[in-house]
Amino acid sequence: MPATPDVPCPHHTLSFLKIATLLAALVCSSGAAQQPAASQSGVNTAKAASQLINGYAPAWWKEAVVYQIYPRSFADSNGDGIGDLNGITQHLDYLKKLGVNVIWLSPHYDSPNADNGYDIRDYRKVMKEFGTMADFDRMLAAIKARHMKLIVDLVVNHSSDEHRWFVESRKSKDNPYRDYYFWRDGKPNASDPEHPLPPNNWHSFFSGSAWQWDDITKQFYLHLFAVKQPDLNWENPKVREDVYSLMKFWLDKGVDGFRMDVIPLISKPVGLPDLDPRNAVEVLANGPHRDEYLQEMNREVLSKYDTMTVGEAIGISLKETPKIVGSGRHELNMIFNFDAVRVNRGEFYSERKWTLPELKAIYDRHATALGKEDWDTVFLSNHDNPRLVSNFGDTTTDEFRVRSAKLIETMLLTLRGTPYIYEGDELGMTNYPFHKLDDFNDIEVKNAWKERVESGRMPEAEFIAESARFGRDNSRTPMQWSSAANGGFTTASGKPWLPVNPNYTSINAKAEVQSADSVYRYVQRAIALHHSSLAFTYGDYKDLDPEHPQVYAYTRTLSTPGKTAERFLVLLNWSEKPVDYTIPGDIKPVKLVLSNVPGAAAAQGQSVNLSGWEARVYSY
Ligand code: NOJ
Ligand code: CA
């Protein structure tokens, strides 16, 4: 019997999805995985050891498949052109049928929207465009009723400049909230004494200096992101107490955890010294009190609830990662590492040529650096990155778009770590055809335009081309629900806050739910496969052919004493070119359990002919 009633047994998911036939050969693992996660605050070690699966302590968040919702772009229920919470509630069955079991909701809090909700004005209030607290409660209840869980975004490296704390803080140097933020005198400016220079050379992630002059008290304040996102001063214990209190507010409502925005940046280097721009991010992410604050947060808040936590960890190397995610560290469950998603990026939005062996090497380094006490995430998209298939797949033809989107999802759902799917990727949604600055909404693009184009450093056309390729608005265009006007995102008369990709007439949820060969239906099968065997969660990972330039071939295997071993072989042809491939070693595929090419032939011994962008998963 599952000890955690609201985590469905994978078998239930399978029968619900009516794909039991496909997966009948797969053995559903023991109920051990359904036990609640061992408390992080000390357990009977002998008992815990006997519950280990392949050396891993089982936990619901390790077995989850997460779906990220960017609320502004998901579904508009009232025709004002902006997605909202009721829109999410209306589409929960769609997500349930897809098979995901945790939803990560990007910020839903009251905000002036300088950075679409990542600038929070009131942490205890719902953004009015998104609805009311009653709408939130209804949405949460509806999520729970479907045996899914919800994690919300925790954005506490900075607040909005319209947050009450900052409104107070900027009033006077002796205001009780002054120390909630970083205020510093400027450096003398010989050429213009009336206008001091910023206190140090820190650069904002959104262009320009990270310091903003404030005329009221004639000091600068720190904002590592937008001018309207002042950094909170975690050295002030009152700030930390207030953050813990707001976390409890949401956990007490029943949310299941947090995705923590740029969380390693909460501890600033002592004395706020000038930094070498080449490693400034790493220095900012490895401040002296980071682990102490996260451990305090764990002690004061997280350890008292059954939560899932995932930190957005810019600047954290793989070597540093176990300090944050190691179970004995009592900090966070997992972090997002950006090595894979940024493999094709140079400086800012410039493109970098990458090779498949490079990508494999990244995943191999993850597998080596993160052991059984640690946990990992797998993702290649989110609201800060281009569309998955445009970024890493092949959109030269519709056939390849569909196939490559399926191939990438196969990889995400069979690699090591908790997989994250970004809204619309399950449809193979693509980048938007941006042509000019006005087409963009994102502050990152607008500010970069000033810094790069207006200053004459970069030609306009080059800037637009790069922003169209890598800009964040690509992933923020509205969900394409149907072929109705505006892709069914908002009512026909409403104007969406960001235009819908014109390809909604052919790429949309309604069509894909109905079509057996669609990306959606495939992702549904791939998620069901992921849930059907704990090998995909706790199994060993082995790259069979790290140097092959075109085929990514790996195994996931789980041997549990007294049970039949669960063994899978994943073959991914990362190219439009067909390939005759010989499976290395003595692996003999037995049964094809997932394939993105209809009618794919069984393997002939160890030889497989893979067509362009073909993905196969075999049991063996
Ligand atoms: C990271 C978030 O993912 C991004 O969207 C946001 O702009 C910055 N942090 C600032 O909060
Ligand atoms: Ca709305």
Image: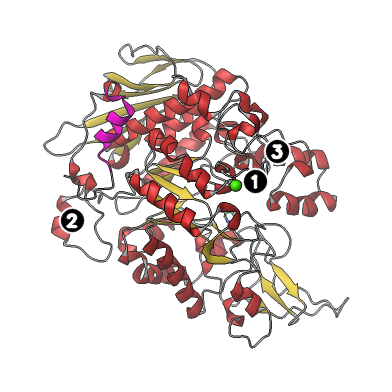
Specify which label sits upstream in the sequence, 2 or 3. Answer: 2
> Magenta includes 249?
no
Q: Residue at x 34, y 53 (%)?
A: 374
CB contact under 8 Å: marks 1 and 3: no
- Quarter of the picture containing the C terminus is top left
Mark 1 and mark 3: span between their CA atoms?
A: 26 Å
Camera-side residue: 314 or 149?
149
Q: Quadrant of residue 205?
A: bottom right
Q: Which mark is residue 565?
A: none
Q: Amino acid at mark 3?
A: Ala
In the picture as drawn, the residue positioned furthest to the right comes out as 191
- The quarter of the picture where residue 463 lies is top right
Determine the CA span between mark 2 and mark 3. 50 Å
Instruction: Decide if residue 524 is on the left or right side of residue 384.
Output: left
Residue 533 percent location from the top left of the image:
27, 34
Closer to the camera: disc 1 or disc 3?
1
Segment colored magenta: 8-20
Kindly state the secondary structure of the residue where label 2 is placed: helix
Residue tagged 1: 80
Query: Taking 618 as reference, is 355 left or right?
Result: right
**Could you tell me what secondary structure mostly forms the magenta stretch?**
helix
Ligand 1: quadrant of the figure: bottom right
Establish whether ligand 1 lies closer than 8 Å to the Cβ of label 2. Answer: no
Q: Amino acid at mark 1?
A: Asp
Instruction: Mark 3 and ligand 1: say if the CB distance to the nearest ligand atom is below 8 Å.
Output: no
Asked whether mark 1 and ligand 2 are closer than 8 Å, the reply comes as yes
Q: Is residue 257 left or right of residue 433?
A: left
Which residue position is annotated with label 3? 468
Estimate the x, y position of residue 207 in percent, counting from the top left.
71, 57
Badge 2 is on which residue?
48
